[in-house]
Image: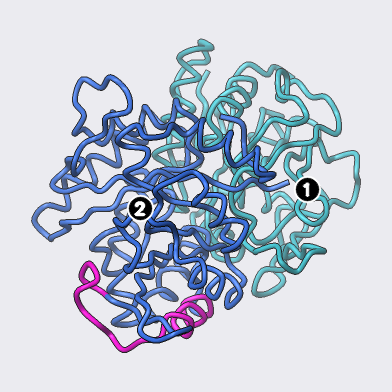
Chain colours: A blue, B cyan
């Protein structure tokens, strides 16, 4: 059967990992390629690179990171941050990304998802949704790191991008991101029930029970976390062992 | 001794190229070349046909290159060189695809490519992620790969074979999903060996060593 995926996410700025990765003895804790190699060896199911400072001038550094990662890691790689249109998708796929994630550009114009999916296939188009609770049972999309409200309902938007051809949704609760208090399970469940494509839960993981809840209660197909892995709080193997003990199907690492 | 990865501008060839190059170095299999040149494809020792995207778009892109399909026929059918299709590159081996519109395939391995319809409606499509393989029949390219080993899948359509003897392995996703097909010197994997870590690299090495 299909396994629940555990996905470490690396925030990258100007070709460097933000805050570094400290769970193994890396020569250079800020090199995303070294971190990717370590996560590959640790049994991560996929990797996610998020270019948090993507500008036209510094895009080349991300392409270089992706290219070097693809030379060493034979595992799925998703890249997001600053992706504007099909040409950006093509450049990242050619560099070695397997999936490319749209965020603000899809909010501004959801048809960009269709243009990219028609050309490259839904399987490589992810839409990242950053949502905040605005009233009970209602979440709104925020862009620009959660600072800018858009007035767009998260569930409506999730259904829309699915129709446009997205192959997967990367769902982040802006209320929970960085809090270590767990996923917004109500949000996760609502989006999972709204669409037929896989949903990756993100934002708020502080414990291994949070990962289990994201799958069991939230219904997500995959869980994404950053700091608990980067700082060595838990290893990928510990996360998977805990999930397996809770009865979830995971790939042995 | 050249292994050719066919470039018809479908998807990401960089990781496939790197994975095949690494295993070619380990197995002494010679050069790995990414090309769309029909002459190079027709005379290759081994041919790998990758593919990402929709079946009709991939087929169109392939047939838009003059002489490329004929070169694949020359290598795989007339010269019987080992051939490996990956993902849509495998699906195009079938008689026809039903994605968007009915589209003819190569008809090298009889069957139809149809949308995955899991028996359990809660199962999401695409079938995306790691699933365990069930080996249906032994094959040199599956040597060292056992039932229970995991491979990375990402697809919404799957190949339904006319002859079950052509199915070498499958996975379960609310019903069987064809994972590896084979007929004579022609092979295909629905999953991505270049993304399937140790299991995928082993399959690639086996393919490079295979002398049918």
- Residue A62 location (% of width, % of height): 22, 47
Q: Which residues are magenta?
A: A143-163
- Residue B132 location (% of width, % of height): 71, 38
Which label is found at residue A116? none
**Any part of residue B72 in sight:** no
Residue topped by disc 1: B172
Instruction: Please tell me whether residue A250 is drawn above or below residue B79 in the rendered image.
Output: below
Q: Residue at x 41, y 73 (%)?
A: A113
Residue topped by disc 2: A180
Q: Residue at x 53, y 15 (%)?
A: B29
Asked if marks 1 and 2 fall on the same chain, the answer is no
Secondary element at image label 1:
strand
| Mark 1–mark 2 distance (CA, rounded to whole Å) | 35 Å
* Front position among marks 1 and 2: 2
Considering every residue shown, the one lying at the far bottom of the view is A151
Decide: few, some or many residues near mark 2? Use Cα within 10 Å; few <14, some 14-19, many ≥20: some
Q: Nearer the viewer, residue A169 or A154?
A: A154
Q: Residue at x 44, y 21 (%)?
A: B22
Instruction: Please tell me whether residue A159 is drawn above or below residue B62 in the rendered image.
Output: below
Q: Quadrant of the C terminus of chain A?
A: top right
Q: Residue at x 54, y 12 (%)?
A: B27
- Residue A231 location (% of width, % of height): 30, 35
Report in which chain the residue with disc 1 lies: B
Report in which chain the residue with disc 2 lies: A
Magenta span contains residue A151: yes
Considering every residue shown, the one lying at the far left of the view is A57
Q: Nearer the viewer, residue A215 or A196?
A: A215
- Residue A239 location (% of width, % of height): 51, 37
Q: Nearer the viewer, residue A242 or B105?
A: A242
């Amino acid at each position: 059967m299909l396994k629940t995926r555990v996905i470490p996410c690396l925030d990258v700025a100007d070709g460097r990992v933000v805050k570094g990765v400290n769970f193994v003895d890396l020569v250079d804790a800020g090199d995303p390629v070294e971190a990717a190699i370590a996560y590959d060896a640790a049994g991560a199911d996929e990797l996610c690179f998020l270019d948090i400072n993507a500008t036209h001038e510094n895009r080349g550094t991300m392409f270089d990171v992706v290219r070097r990662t693809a030379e060493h890691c034979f595992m799925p790689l998703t890249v997001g941050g600053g992706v504007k249109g099909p040409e950006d998708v093509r450049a990242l796929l050619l560099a070695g990304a397997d999936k490319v994630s749209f965020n603000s550009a899809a909010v501004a114009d959801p048809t960009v998802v269709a243009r990219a999916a028609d050309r490259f296939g839904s399987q490589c188009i992810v839409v990242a949704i950053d949502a905040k609770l605005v009233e009970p049972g209602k979440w709104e999309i925020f862009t620009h790191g959660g600072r800018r409200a858009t007035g767009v309902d998260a569930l409506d938007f999730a259904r829309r991008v699915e129709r446009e051809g997205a192959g997967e949704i990367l769902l982040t609760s802006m209320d929970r991101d960085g809090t270590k208090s767990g996923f917004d399970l109500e949000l996760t469940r609502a989006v999972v029930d709204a669409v037929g494509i896989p949903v990756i839960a993100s934002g708020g993981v502080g414990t291994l029970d949070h990962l289990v809840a994201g799958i069991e209660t939230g219904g997500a197909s995959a869980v994404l976390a950053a700091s608990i892995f980067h700082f060595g709080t838990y290893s990928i193997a510990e996360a998977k062992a805990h999930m397996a003990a809770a009865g979830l199907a995971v790939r042995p690492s | 001794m050249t292994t050719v990865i066919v470039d018809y501008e479908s998807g990401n060839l960089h990781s496939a190229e790197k994975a095949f190059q690494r295993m070619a170095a380990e197995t002494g299999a010679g050069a790995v070349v990414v090309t769309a040149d029909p002459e190079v494809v027709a005379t290759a020792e081994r041919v790998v046909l990758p593919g990402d995207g929709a079946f009709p778009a991939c087929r169109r892109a392939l047939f838009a290159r003059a002489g490329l399909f004929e070169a694949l026929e020359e290598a795989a059918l007339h010269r019987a060189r080992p051939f490996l299709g990956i993902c849509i590159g495998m699906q195009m081996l079938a008689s026809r695809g039903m994605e968007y519109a009915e589209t003819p395939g190569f008809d090298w391995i009889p069957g139809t490519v149809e949308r995955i319809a899991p028996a359990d409606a809660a199962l999401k499509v695409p079938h995306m992620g790691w699933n365990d393989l069930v080996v249906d029949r032994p094959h040199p390219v599956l040597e060292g790969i056992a039932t229970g080993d995991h491979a990375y899948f990402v697809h919404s359509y799957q190949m339904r074979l006319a002859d079950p003897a052509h199915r070498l392995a499958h996975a379960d996703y609310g019903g069987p999903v064809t994972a590896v097909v084979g007929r004579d010197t022609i092979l295909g994997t629905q999953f991505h060996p270049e993304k399937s870590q140790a299991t995928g690299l082993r399959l690639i090495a086996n393919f490079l060593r295979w002398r049918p």
